[in-house]
Image (cartoon, rainbow, N blue to C red):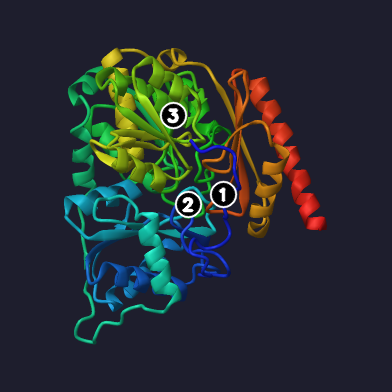
Amino acid sequence: MSQKGAGAKIASSRDGRDTRNGRRLFGTNGIRGLANVELTTEFVMRIGGAVGTFFREGRLLVGYDGRTSSPMLAQAVIAGLTSTGCTVYNVGMTPTPAIQYAVRHHKMDGAVMVTASHNPPKYNGIKVIAENGIELSRQHEIEIEDIFSDDRIRKADWNAIGEARQLPGIFDVYREGIKKHIDVKAIQKRRLHVIVDSGNAVGGLVAPYLLREIGCKVTTINTNIDGAFPSRTPEPRPENLGELSSIMSVVGADLGVAYDGDADRSIFVDESGEVHWGDRTFGLIERSFLQNNPGEKIVTPVSSSYLIKDIAEEYGGEVVWTKVGSIIVAHTMKKVKAKLGGEENGGVFYAPHQPVRDGAMTTALILDIIAETERKLSELLSELPSYYLEKDKFNCPNELKEPIMEELNQQIEGMIVDTTDGVKISFPDKSSILIRPSGTEPIYRFYAEGKTRRRATHLLTEYKAKLHRLVDELRDD
């Protein structure tokens, strides 16, 4: 991991070029913005044109999540793509992992997914996916940004405009693909009861059907798709999952699972109703994986718990740390030929299926472990090293992100610091605090960890107050 140095630039484009209101187009995970304000149909159509120019008359899938603005923006993307001569296959409303799997299965050149993932309902976004199902590398994103900013969008001749077609049935293929990596008979034998909370988003289109097919009794909540997300926010966090937690003990379920807005992440609730952060269930999958695959590499961002390192050391694995961002994890896995990656936010990358975050695949892996061990989720998680994680965020204008990072670096000189992404300060008692600017929103994120909840909470309070003071000072200047 890199050592103490200057903070990374956040607000400008990677090659120094202004691409949109002084900011680059692509953030940590695709293009994000306010629907019909920043992401207007005109803007998105031009993005579609730039993407289509990049793919050079390729065959592309287009899908979208359940947000109110998504069908409109998907049509704008399709118009932009076909105007360059690309052939587009519209798969309709879908979880992101399903369209990623379909790209490889149908041997497409790529895909565009309209989604803002966990962001609030007024936001939307665009993810561009390569032929291998992984989102485009940073280098290829820059190529699209250059096409967009240099106005090099290709216009096909009137008789060479691309066709827009439909491609139904991708969910069936996706579910069958997941089943290949689990012991279906063992899960059927256990007859597990699972509660699925899709948060009024697209997770309800696949997961309940998959779980019933592998022999689970399924209870669903919040599965009606509603782009306003009336039941909870699209980001599944412990404070948002009170309904799921309270239902667990009432109905006597074995497992609860909640998905984010595009169903590539999953957060689990055990049979007692306790909600667990994603790095604990990732740690459970990691332990099972390393028991069967000793010596393998595990890829995870610096925001993950030291729990992941502890498990790797105990079971003969090697941790490869990365910057925060699912695209970075996926491409690092490809580079180092790793079969497993994960994030603290509930994203698990299981490369034998596909090396991207996949909420339904993660659910199947957890069920597979429960069935194989014939034990409860709470018992399995209690065996893992104990850490407490506290997360928070506060609003910060994009133009202040870099000055804040520079000031913070000066104030923590001499401490044990890692600058792989933002700054992560480590302490001798195995506690740490990661402070990093978001790549998708005008906010700073905090990840505090300690061997006790009190220690984690203390670090969070201390450093959040420190950054608040920095913001006030910079605003006064």
For the point 22% across and 28% down, which residue is it? 182
Disc 3 crowd, CA 10 A, few/some/many (<14, 14-19, 20+):
many
Where's the C terminus, which quadrant? bottom right
Query: Is any part of residue 207 visible from this angle?
Result: no
Left or right, 470 with reference to 231: right
Residue hosting label 3: 268
Left or right, 54 with reference to 265: left
Are discs 2 and 3 less than 8 Å apart at CB? no
Q: Which numbered mark, 3 or 1, is in the foreground of this view?
A: 1
Residue hosting label 1: 438
Residue hosting label 2: 28
SS at badge 3: strand
Spot occupied by residue 26 in the image (x, y as percentages of width and height): 46, 60
SS at badge 2: loop
For the point 42% across and 48% down, which residue is it? 201
Disc 2 crowd, CA 10 A, few/some/many (<14, 14-19, 20+):
some
Name the amino acid, label 2. Answer: Thr
Disc 1 crowd, CA 10 A, few/some/many (<14, 14-19, 20+):
many
